[in-house]
């Protein structure tokens, strides 16, 4: 028996519901955005399980690949990063700078989007997805969106709810009908 034969893969640790213990200081507490906040957006939505039941203790991390410049919040958050938790009804809201188009390594441009990591109880590993924004001209040419079957693309696109406040609505469905597209990593 060699030393390698004793190495047995172990499952990942199940996440949650303990997020407030170590992550609370990074939760986004930005106020609701107003029209005078040029360049800012708000994404509101819900995290739902396969039965459409709200997930009350999920955490979502939003990363913008196009935001590399300093922001007013740099002391509190890394640039282009926001974290938010769901409430008892599965609702979340996050305020951020509007992402811009971002180049791929080969020079092609991606539509403005944010990478989203989803953490919730019962998940052995976090989920990775993206959120794009309705009515962005770059959406039709985006390499990633074009790879998604047309009937599933809507799960990645936040709908504009209020033009004056730049507020978007986007739900995360963990399984089932209209499941959000998640990416392997």
Image (cartoon, grey):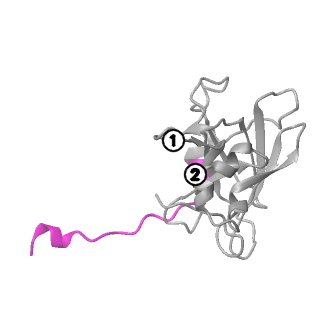
x then y, percent, for residue 164? 90, 37
**Crowd rating for badge 1 (residues with CA inside 10 Å; few <14, some 14–19, many 20+):** few
Question: Which of marks 1 and 2 precedes in the sequence?
Answer: 1
Q: Residue at x 75, y 35 (%)?
A: 30
Secondary element type, mark 1: loop
Magenta stretch, main secondary structure class: loop
Q: Nearer the viewer, residue 53 or 13?
A: 53
Disc 1 marks which residue?
104
Residue reaching furthest to the left: 1
Disc 2 marks which residue?
143
x then y, percent, for residue 66? 59, 35
x then y, percent, for residue 182? 58, 62
- Residue 99 against residue 17 in the figure, above or below: above
- Residue 31 against residue 135 in the figure, above or below: above
Q: Residue at x 79, y 61 (%)?
A: 89
- Which residue range is magenta in the image? 1-21
Q: Is residue 68 left or right of residue 39?
A: left
Indicate whether residue 22 is drawn in magenta: no
**Crowd rating for badge 2 (residues with CA inside 10 Å; few <14, some 14–19, many 20+):** some
In this orientation, does residue 69 appear? yes
Q: Please identify the quadrant where the N terminus is shown.
A: bottom left
Q: Residue at x 56, y 69 (%)?
A: 122
Q: CA distance from mark 2 to mark 1?
A: 9 Å
Q: Nearer the viewer, residue 79 or 28?
A: 79
Q: Quadrant of residue 3?
A: bottom left
Q: Is residue 94 left or right of residue 2?
A: right
Q: Quadrant of residue 152?
A: bottom right
Q: Nearer the viewer, residue 67 or 119?
A: 67
Q: Which mark is residue 138?
A: none
Q: Nearer the viewer, residue 183 or 43?
A: 183
x then y, percent, for residue 162? 89, 44
In this orientation, does residue 91 appear? no
């Amino acid at each position: 028996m060699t030393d390698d034969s004793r190495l047995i893969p172990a499952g990942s640790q199940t996440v949650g519901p303990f997020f407030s213990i170590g992550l609370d200081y990074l939760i986004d507490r930005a106020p609701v955005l107003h029209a005078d906040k040029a360049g800012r957006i708000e994404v509101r939505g819900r995290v739902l399980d396969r039965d459409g039941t709200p997930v009350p203790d999920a955490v979502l991390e939003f990363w913008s690949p196009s935001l590399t410049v300093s922001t007013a919040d740099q002391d509190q958050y890394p640039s282009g990063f926001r974290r938010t938790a769901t409430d008892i009804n599965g609702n979340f809201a996050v305020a951020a700078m509007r992402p811009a188009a971002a180049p791929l390594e080969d020079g092609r441009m991606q539509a403005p989007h944010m990478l989203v990591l989803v953490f919730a109880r019962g998940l052995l590993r976090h989920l990775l997805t993206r959120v794009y924004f309705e009515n962005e001209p770059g959406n039709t040419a985006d390499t990633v969106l074009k790879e998604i079957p047309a009937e599933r693309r809507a799960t990645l696109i936040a709908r504009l709810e209020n033009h004056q406040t730049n507020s978007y609505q986007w739900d995360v469905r963990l399984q089932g009908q209209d499941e959000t597209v998640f990416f392997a990593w």
